[in-house]
Image: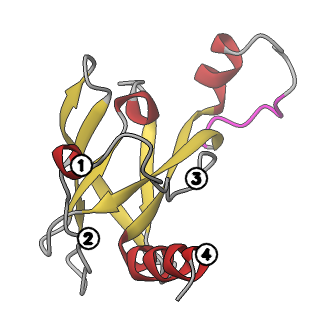
Amino acid sequence: MNHEDEIVRAVEAALPSVISITISKHVNIAEQELPFRGTWKENDKENVRIGGGSGFIISADGLVLTNKHVIVDPDADYTVFDQEGRKNEVKILARDPIHDVAILKISPPHNFRPIPLGSSRDLKLGQTVIAIGNALG
């Protein structure tokens, strides 16, 4: 097996644990905060997507590890979609601004496939690492 095949296998193994995070806000709040004011249609009941990111399911009961910068806005609404396209409710459990990590809890419980966490202590200088996810959710 060559190096590229090993990377493909690693990504395929991790993919069931990857989730997408959609960030949205009520249209009136988003309009006030964004620099291009007046571009949204007036609608008091509508949320607009303002961003996205990704994370990993790390436990069978729905704990998710993501970056703090993905869920930085306490006034935004967050929605998680798993690889099956299921929409999951989100509760933010912890944000660590120093290490840029956050822990979420998603529900309702499905047959979540957690990814085992490794340790950076096992890496060697110059070793290839893979970033798996989608910066835009």
> Viewed as shown, does residue 52 lie left or right of 129?
right
- Residue 53 x, y percent position in the rendering: 52, 46
Residue at the spot of label 1:
104
Task: Confirm or deny contact between disc 1 and disc 4 (CB under 8 A).
Answer: no
| Cβ–Cβ under 8 Å for marks 1 and 2 | no
Q: Is residue 10 magenta?
A: no
Span highlighted in magenta in the image: 40-45
Query: Which mark is drawn over residue 4?
Result: 4
How packed mark 4 is, by other alpha carbons closer than 10 Å (few <14, some 14-19, many 20 or more), is few
Rendered location of residue 39, percent (x, y): 87, 25
- Say which amino acid is labelled 1: Leu
Cα separation between marks 2 and 4: 21 Å
Q: CA distance from mark 3 to mark 4?
A: 25 Å
Q: Main secondary structure of the magenta part?
A: loop
In this view, 15 is above or below 75: below
**Left or right relative to 17: residue 30:** right
Q: Residue at x 24, y 87 (%)?
A: 111
Identify the element where label 4 is drawn.
helix
Which label sits on residue 8? none
The disc, 1 or 2, on the residue closer to the chain's N-terminal end is 1
Give the Cα separation between the discs numbered 3 and 2.
Answer: 18 Å
- The type of residue carrying mark 4 is Glu
- How far across and how far down the image is residue 37, in percent? 81, 13
Say which mark, if any, is on residue 115: 2
Q: Residue lying farthest right?
A: 39
